[in-house]
Amino acid sequence: MVPASYGVTELDRLPRLGGLFAKGAAGSVTKRPKGAVRLPEVSYRVAGVDTSGEAAHLAAYQDLLGEPASDVLPAGFLHVLAFPLATAVMVRPDFPLPLLGMVHLRNVARVLRPVRLGEALEVRAWAQDVRGHRRGVQVDLVAEVLVGGELAYQGVSTYLAKGFTAPGAAAPGEPADDGTRPEWTAPLPTARWTLGGGTGRAYGAVSGDLNPIHTSALGAKAFGFPRAIAHGMYTAARALAEVGPALRGDRYEWTVEFFRPVLLPSTVDVAIRPAGDGLVYDGWRSGKGTRHLTGTVTPL
């Protein structure tokens, strides 16, 4: 739910990521650590988002991720639809953290009712809960999808901005990807993904996220990677597809925590197994102990 103190900015349509990334890249130059971080108290809202024209887009997404053909929009596709609005919040001049260099740490998404192709949606997005991390600050970007005024989906994406300071006393940091996580042993795999060098470009085509760290070796090298890396949400959404609609149900919570990035091309082993009332999944570099991601899918 949007915090009560936040104002609402109405947009007439969902923005396109290409222009937002260009704006974010330009704005990142001036956003440097200089005191405690304070977020803009504003949410963006787009009403009447018509999904009737999304059939080809949905089919391309399902084909790429391995989702079965259906008129139900999986959580990964809802993330794709809402992500541009959350990005619009992050590229505001008064959003204090730079878009370039932000590290995607984790996601928690909840599907509270099926969203079907052809339904009209209301999409909302805002930033909240800036807090300390031992390498900087982390912040949550929240995106919601409503149908007929009923909350159908909420996704919370947590990002790390290195070198910044949270307001007040720093909270205990979440584990960063610096080798300090508890020791982990790979379980028996239940699937193996062979990811070609064009995986980032393919997911970029269906998601709109054409960040050069995913689409070109040169772009990736500019940010310290030896070659292009897979989108984190591609790997998480592919794991969600591996679980499948029958096991996750119509209402479910889907979580993911990211560890080491997946360099392209690559082979990733995946294990999906029961845990409590749902399932847990892990993905790691085939033949190695390099863990890429872990998460859960739990029916609600």
Image (cartoon, grey):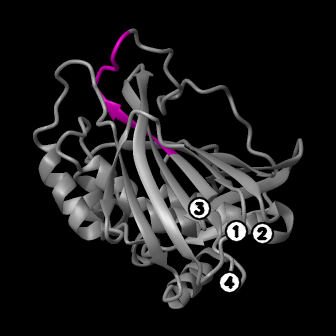
Q: As drawn, is 73 to the left or to the right of 34?
A: right
Q: Which mark is residue 149?
A: 3
Q: Disc 1 designates what residue?
A: 241
Mark 3 or mark 2: whose residue is earlier in sequence: 3
Q: Give coordinates of residue 170: x percent, y percent.
A: 41, 13
The answer to the question of whether label 2 and label 4 lie on touching residues, with beta carbons closer than 8 A, is no
Cα separation, mark 2 vs mark 4, equals: 14 Å
Give the mark toward the camera: 3 or 2.
3
Mark 2 is on which residue type? Gly
Cα separation, mark 1 vs mark 2, equals: 5 Å
Give the mark toward the camera: 2 or 4.
4
Q: Give coordinates of residue 182: x percent, y percent.
A: 66, 25
Residue at 31% x, 68% y is: 15
Q: Which mark is residue 71?
A: 4
Cα separation, mark 3 vs mark 4, equals: 20 Å
The magenta stretch is 157-168
> Of 298 and 186, which appears nearest the observer?
298
> Of 81 and 107, which appears nearest the observer?
81
Residue at 37% x, 66% y is: 209
Q: Disc 2 designates what residue?
A: 244
Q: Secondary structure at mark 1?
A: helix
Cα separation, mark 3 vs mark 1, equals: 28 Å
> Of 42 and 206, which appears nearest the observer?
42
Give the mark toward the camera: 3 or 4.
3
The residue carrying pointer 1 sits among few (fewer than 14), some (14 to 19) or many (20 or more) residues within 10 Å by Cα, namely some
The answer to the question of whether label 1 and label 2 lie on touching residues, with beta carbons closer than 8 A, is yes
Q: As drawn, is 49 to the left or to the right of 217?
A: right
**Membership of 164 in magenta stretch:** yes
Mark 4 is on which residue type? Asp
